[in-house]
Image: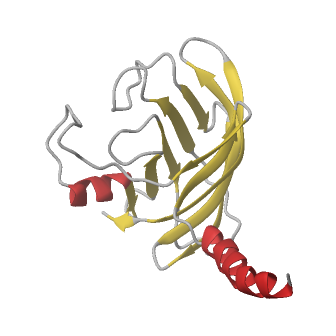
Amino acid sequence: MRWLLLIILPFLLSKSKADTDVSGIQFRFKGRDMILLHPMRKSKDSFLPRGEYSDRKLDTLSNWFDPEKKYVEIIRQDNPVQPSIGMALGFEFDETNGDYPYTPAYGTLQLKNFGWGGVEFSPRDTLNYTGVSNDVSDDLTIEILAFSHDTITGAFSGLLLSGAGPMAPIENGRFKVRVYRK
């Protein structure tokens, strides 16, 4: 039995370390733990109505940082080419701040069920959830924990609102994503 533990223990230790290094978004919503690891990708069967983008361009669109506008946007989904759930998370970010944790003055989150309305996010989606943090509304809390070598790490939680009316909490949100500078 001891030999089995000696064989399995290094695997378990390396797996737990690898899990903390995963690039993506994790959260709990409506009683389900969700992990969104994939940026947008094209396939022969996928359809992006606003243009024919290469995977390289979709990579940039999925995680970008504009230092001039001081804004970050991250898009992740559960499957790269046939997603069922996706999230767009955007927030104000000043990389020269240097003090962490850092709470952005403005943030927005949209959680999308791709079964309702196709693969693109749209303000007309009524069966998807959104949250905003700004001077008027405080539905969402975003905290930037670290920014190093263009990789941003943070946490979020809040109360999301559906276009159809219902509200639902989003809890234990975490993200770690390498961003491309615009």
What residue lies at 32% left-to-right and 44% top-to-bottom? 81
Task: State the quadrant of the C terminus.
Answer: bottom left
**Placement of 113 over or under 81, stated as above or below:** above
Taking the view exactly as shown, the residue that stands out farthest to the front is: 1
Task: State the quadrant of the N terminus.
Answer: bottom right
Nearer to me, 137 or 42: 42
The picture quadrant where one finds residue 46 is top left
What residue lies at 24% left-to-right and 47% top-to-bottom? 42
Taking the view exactly as shown, the residue that stands out farthest to the top is: 164
Nearer to me, 114 or 176: 114
Question: Which x, y percent locates residue 107?
Answer: 56, 44
Q: Is residue 31 left or right of residue 59?
A: right
The chosen color scheme is secondary structure
Question: Which x, y percent locates residue 63?
Answer: 40, 57
Question: Which x, y percent locates residue 102?
Answer: 67, 63
Taking the view exactly as shown, the residue that stands out farthest to the right is: 2
**Placement of 169 over or under 54, stated as above or below:** above
**Placement of 98 over or under 47, stated as above or below:** below
Q: Is residue 168 left or right of residue 111?
A: right
Question: Which x, y percent locates residue 136?
Answer: 63, 31
The picture quadrant where one finds residue 145 is bottom right
What residue lies at 70% left-to-right and 26% top-to-bottom? 168
**Placement of 137 over or under 171, stated as above or below:** above
The picture quadrant where one finds residue 32 is top right
What residue lies at 54% left-to-right and 39% top-to-bottom? 109
Q: Is residue 32 left or right of residue 75?
A: right
